[in-house]
Image (cartoon, rainbow, N blue to C red):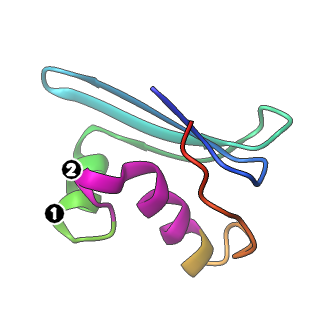
Amino acid sequence: MKTKYKSPFIVHTWFERDRANIWVEDANNKKVAEWWDEDVVQMFDDGFFDHRFVGESVLSYLAEHKIISKNYTFVPE
């Protein structure tokens, strides 16, 4: 599943039974961040990611940790 934003970031998610992957790409398809399996679960358990707003919460986390600019606007696809 892809969630697009007005900024050039795309949040990708992939879940299958006991596997999970979340990654973010910029407009040039360069990976900005990625989490796998236990790290994905931990991010949700610790409250950094929200199950109801995965894309938005992932980008908020990256902005808060200064990995991406805070100047993005959430625009669901």
| Tag 2: amino acid | Val
Residue, far right:
28
User: How much space separates mark 1 and mark 2, taking CA atoms?
Assistant: 6 Å
Picture layout, residue 58 above or below residue 62: above
Q: Is mark 2 on a helix, strand or loop?
A: helix
Residue 17 found in image quarter:
top left
Residue 26: percent from the left, percent from the top? Answer: 76, 44
Question: Split into 4 quadrants, where in the image is the N terminus?
Answer: top left
Q: Residue at x 54, y 44 (%)?
A: 76
Picture layout, residue 4 above or below residue 70: above
Category of crowding for the residue at label 2, using alpha-carbon neighbours closer than 10 angstroms: few (below 14), some (14–19), many (at least 20):
some
Q: Mark 1 points at which residue?
A: 45
Residue 69: percent from the left, percent from the top? Answer: 75, 72
Residue 38: percent from the left, percent from the top? Answer: 22, 46
Q: What element carries label 1?
A: helix
| Tag 1: amino acid | Asp
Question: Split into 4 quadrants, where in the image is the C terminus?
Answer: top right
Please check the rendered image and state whether residue 43 is part of the magenta-colored stretch, yes or no. no
Q: Mark 2 points at which residue?
A: 41
The residue nearer to you, when weighing 35 against 8, is 8
The residue nearer to you, when weighing 77 against 69, is 77
Left or right: where 18 falls relative to 43? left
Residue 44 found in image quarter:
bottom left
Residue 41: percent from the left, percent from the top? Answer: 21, 50
Q: Over which residues does the magenta segment extend? A: 49-62
Residue 72 found in image quarter:
bottom right
